[in-house]
């Protein structure tokens, strides 16, 4: 998930949770205060009855009539006979169970969801029942809850709009998101490359070490040690290339400068001529073709292409190199007359899988073209492999307009 989306979701969750918590506290506080008012009214009636020496039924009727909160008073006589003394408050559909009436003698309790009751004990096992409706309070709570939900939705929409406008103008968070994603991809690629490429030399070294332990012949021992040493050197090469791949794949800050692509290609061609003088080398290189990049990475890219040619093609196979501008792109093309590849993959991350076998035969790490691919991807370029007219491999690298050095 992109970092911007994660931050936006986190903001939504925080605002929603905060609004719910504040709203719940406010609604609970309102509900509690209203219940307290009802309980205070019921309790005051009980205290008044306890304090008077007049007829309780008459006093109860008077207290209900002057109450600021409408209430119903019922007289519960022996034998379960019920007489309603007032018609001001709510209707009581059914007299509560005896256990609730006993509990209501000492405190105010709920009867159902919409009634609050309190009882006053009379002589001869008789009692008065005071009832106040909670319907209006419950209705107010429902309205407040609905308004809270609408408020949260409105605030979330406003927060989303603000977050969109802020993140759209400020690209730093997007840069951090891309940086994290690139680092994760680089780590995954590094682990995949390491597990794939290091398995073979480790197995070979382990085999030769076991053979060396079981032999007493000095000649065989020297052979086993020499072959183990060769694999160790190859492992060192692989590890260095893997570390370079990891470094090239990281989207970290680097030194960007004017890189003379023309000069770098010519230098590597001169090295190739010096090392393998039998080759026929043709070049068509435009003057002063430059790009804005890291010179070390670009030099490694070009060096790997020519190193692959030296290792995997006959020393008299022809080579051709081109460097030119094609519209809004800088193009590097290197071809050889070697055996080429069995297949020409479209996905650059699969390149080493097609060249690993011949790389082992030539003493390489099998990661040469993967390094090329990583450098090209770092600068948003394009890498394509195809059959060369010379008979071997054609490698074409295209760098986009944004890394041009604008030369008149």
Image: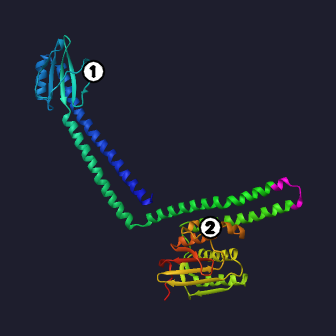
Q: Earlier in the sequence, mark 2 or mark 1?
A: 1
Instruction: Say whether residue 139 is left or right of residue 265.
Output: left
Residue nearest the viewer, comparing 324 with 43: 324
Element marked by disc 2: helix
Q: Taking 211 as reference, is 169 left or right?
A: left
Q: Is residue 85 left or right of residue 103?
A: left
Task: Using residue 353 as the reference point, say whether residue 107 is left or right of it.
Answer: left
The question of residue 216 being in magenta is answered with: yes
- Quarter holding residue 230: bottom right
Q: Is residue 304 above or below residue 52?
A: below
Q: Eyeballing the image, is 22 above or below 55?
A: below
Relative to the observer, which residue lies in front, 213 or 161? 213
User: In percent of the image, x 12 and y 16: which residue is there?
Assistant: 55
Q: Quadrant of the N terminus?
A: bottom left
Q: Residue 261 appears in which quarter of the rendering? A: bottom right
Residue 80, percent across and down?
Answer: 18, 14
Residue 354: mark? 2
Q: Is residue 198 above or below residue 362?
A: above
Q: Residue at x 72, y 82 (%)?
A: 276
x and y, in percent, of residue 397 in the image: 55, 77
The mark found on residue 150 in the picture is none
2 vs 1, front mark:
2
- Which structural element holds mark 1? helix
Residue at image coords 50%, 72%: 380
Specify start and end residues of the magenta stretch as a single range.
Answer: 211-219
Q: Which residue is mark 1?
A: 103
Q: Main secondary structure of the magenta part?
A: helix
> Is 18 in the magenta?
no
Residue 276 or 254: which is nearer the viewer? 276
Residue 99: quadrant of the picture: top left
Disc 2 and disc 1 in contact, CB within 8 angstroms:
no
């Amino acid at each position: 998930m992109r970092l911007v989306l994660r931050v936006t979701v986190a903001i939504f969750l925080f605002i929603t949770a905060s609004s719910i918590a504040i709203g719940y506290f406010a609604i609970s506080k309102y509900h509690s205060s209203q219940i307290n008012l009802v309980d205070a009214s019921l309790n005051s009636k009980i205290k008044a009855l306890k304090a008077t020496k007049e007829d309780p039924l008459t006093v109860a009727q008077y207290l209900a009539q002057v109450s600021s909160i409408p209430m119903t008073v019922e007289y519960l006589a022996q034998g379960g006979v019920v007489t309603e003394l007032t018609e001001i408050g709510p209707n009581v559909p059914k007299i509560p169970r005896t256990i609730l009436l006993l509990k209501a003698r000492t405190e105010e309790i709920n009867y159902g969801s919409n009634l609050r009751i309190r009882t006053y004990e009379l002589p001869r096992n008789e009692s008065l029942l005071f009832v106040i409706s909670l319907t209006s309070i419950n209705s107010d709570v429902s309205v407040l809850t609905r308004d809270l939900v609408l408020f949260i939705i409105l605030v979330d929409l406003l927060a989303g709009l603000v977050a969109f406008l802020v993140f759209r103008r400020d690209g730093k968070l997007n840069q951090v998101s891309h940086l994290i994603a690139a680092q994760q991809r680089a780590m995954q690629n590094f682990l995949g490359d390491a597990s794939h490429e290091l398995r073979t030399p480790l197995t070979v070294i382990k085999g030769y070490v076991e053979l060396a332990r079981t032999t007493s012949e000095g000649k065989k021992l020297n052979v086993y040690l020499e072959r183990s040493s060769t694999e160790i050197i190859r492992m060192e090469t692989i590890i260095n290339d893997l570390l370079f791949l990891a470094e090239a794949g990281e989207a970290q800050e680097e030194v960007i400068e004017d890189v003379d692509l023309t000069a770098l290609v010519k230098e590597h061609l001169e090295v190739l001529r010096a090392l393998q003088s039998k080759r026929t080398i043709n070049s068509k290189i435009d003057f002063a073709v430059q790009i804005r990049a890291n010179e070390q990475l670009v030099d490694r890219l070009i060096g790997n292409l020519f190193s692959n040619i030296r290792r995997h093609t006959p020393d008299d196979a022809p080579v051709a190199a081109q460097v030119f501008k094609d519209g809004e792109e800088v193009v590097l093309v290197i071809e050889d007359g070697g055996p080429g590849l069995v297949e020409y993959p479209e996905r650059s991350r699969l390149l080493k899988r097609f060249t690993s076998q011949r790389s082992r035969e030539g003493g390489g790490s099998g990661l040469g073209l993967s390094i090329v691919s990583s450098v090209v991807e770092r600068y948003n370029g394009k890498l394509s492999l195809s059959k060369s007219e010379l008979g071997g491999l054609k490698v074409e690298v295209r760098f986009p307009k944004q890394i041009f050095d604008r030369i008149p």
